[in-house]
Image (tube, helix red, strand yellow):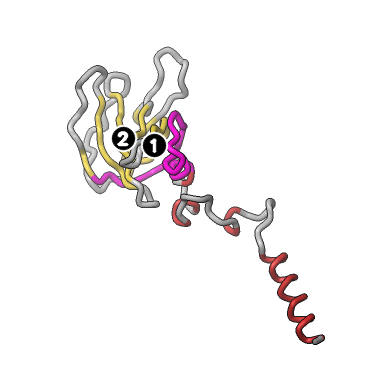
Amino acid sequence: MKTLLLIAALAAAAYFALAPGPDAPESRKAAPPGVSLAARDSNDAAIEHAFANRLGSQLVEGRGTVVKILADDNSGSRHQRFIVRLDSGRTLLMSHNIDLAPRIDGLRTGDTVAFYGEYEWNPKGGVIHWTHHDPQGRHPAGWIRHDGRIYQ
């Protein structure tokens, strides 16, 4: 009986010693619901959270690999469009306003881009826009970095 009590006490001590508490480092905490461990361990967590909760108007930063170059959207303000895949596996449509920011010349499938912009939810993964300055100064300036150059 003493052996069972000792085992139970050791198990309880181990549980409380190893269980992540509110002050535990991020690496010991579980990923939030709907966010993969790969996303939690990368910069994709905010995007995964926004996708899982169908959020829009979320300022996010990330990086991904260009998997498809699309035709420009020329209705209204012109936008350079391409799809990136994040480390989490999520794909995003990048919609970069080329009336307000320079076109990303030389962009190719397989290239890596980093970005800061506004995430809008859609069932295909989401869209990142506002990857440029706001000429009226009412919106935080976004950007895309490709091949060592910042486009905004």
Residue picked out by circle 2: 94
Residue 148 makes an appearance in the image = no
Marks 2 and 1 close (CB-CB < 8 Å): yes
Residue 66 makes an appearance in the image = yes
Element type where label 2 sits in the image: strand
Residue 24 within the magenta-colored segment of the rendering: no
Residue 52 within the magenta-colored segment of the rendering: yes
63 to the left or right of 84? right
What label sits on residue 115 in the rendered view?
A: 1
Residue at image location 59% in from the left, 56% down from the top: 29
**Which image quarter is the C terminus in?**
top left
135 to the left or right of 31? left
Q: Position of residue 13 (x, y in %)?
A: 75, 70
The region drawn magenta spans 46-67
Q: Position of residue 56 (x, y in %)?
A: 43, 31
Residue neighbourhood size for the residue with mark 1, other residues' Cα within 10 Å, grouped as few (<14), some (14–19), many (≥20)? many
Q: Position of residue 32 (x, y in %)?
A: 53, 50
Image quadrant where residue 11 sits: bottom right
Compared to 59, does 64 lie above or below? below
Distance (Cα) linking label 2 and label 1: 9 Å
Task: Tell me the kind of residue under disc 2.
Answer: Met
